[in-house]
Amino acid sequence: MPWFWRAPKNTTHKNSRVVHAAKRANDPVDLDMLPKDLREVNRLDFQHYFMRQALNSNYLAPIQRPTGILDIGCGTGRWMAEMAQKFPQASVTSTDVTPISLTNSSIPFSSNCHFQQNNVLDGLPFLPNTFDFSHLRFLSFALPLQTWPSVVQELIRVTRPGGWVELVEPDLTLRNPGPETVRLLQLVGHSCETRGLDVTIGKKLSSFLQNAGLTNVIERKISIPMGSWGGRIGSMLAINYDEAAVVLKPLVTAITKVPPEEYDFIVEAWQRENNMYHTTCDFYVAYGQRP
């Protein structure tokens, strides 16, 4: 076990109280709106490839030769595996509420990869000043809005002075939506609001970093077309979001009481409207340096 791991904080942590209260208020549906089945695992892998192509990189912060890298909410761990190959001198650690195997996986994890099962809302099980680069992305369906400032503070705590913190999230309101797309966004948005989630979290990332005291904060907005009208990257985004709409179906229909067949109709219309109206989605990457 790496030296920088420590025992997780107990359940009296303020973030833990937040998430436990949210679960009680919204039972029986789990706080994280996306299930962890095989279909979602495949979507997470596809999402990784899509975002890497969109950024032409796995990160944007100006890191040089880090010796410690952290990824929060790692999913299948592909980002960790690729970062470990790019920076073989670094110890690359990932966390997620769902365990992954570093030895029994189709992903080629190198020896400098480490995994720790953890819910960031309970605090991170690492010593202060451990990592040169702390990374979090695509947790808008898992982290309630009120918890983001505390999560960012936890990332800063485990990042060394001079190190970088990077956040990546979309603004799911979409631009140039068709009428059925608007209906779908309203349904998903309402379902998120009942759980304290914010579908516009992407455009708030830089303010979280600035308010937490980071310096050299940079925000980059990447507008990506959705659908075949946008070429390869547009098709990739559409496939990713179509899969997300499918796995969200039982949760959204349970919360909104929309009949499943009506939800299916809206999703099918949305898929057509992406090309008709040239719908786009804005993704935000924000990073800052710890003083």
Image (cartoon, rainbow, N blue to C red):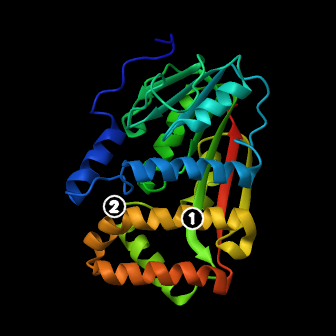
Q: Give the quarter of the image for residue 101.
A: top left
Which residue is at 57% across, 25% downward?
109
Which residue does the numbered mark 1 point to in the structure image?
239
Give the image location of residue 156, x and y in percent.
Answer: 58, 33
Res. 137 mark: none
Q: Give the quarter of the image for residue 287.
A: top right
Number of dots carrying numbers: 2
How packed mark 2 is, by other alpha carbons closer than 10 Å (few <14, some 14-19, many 20 or more), is many
Q: Secondary structure at mark 1?
A: helix
Which residue does the numbered mark 2 point to in the structure image?
195
Q: Nearer the viewer, residue 69 or 157?
A: 69
Q: Nearer the viewer, residue 6 or 55?
A: 55
Give the image location of residue 9, x and y in percent.
Answer: 35, 26
Give the image location of residue 216, x and y in percent.
Answer: 76, 42
Task: Tell which residue pokes out farthest to the bottom in this image.
Answer: 179
| Image quarter hosting the C terminus | top right
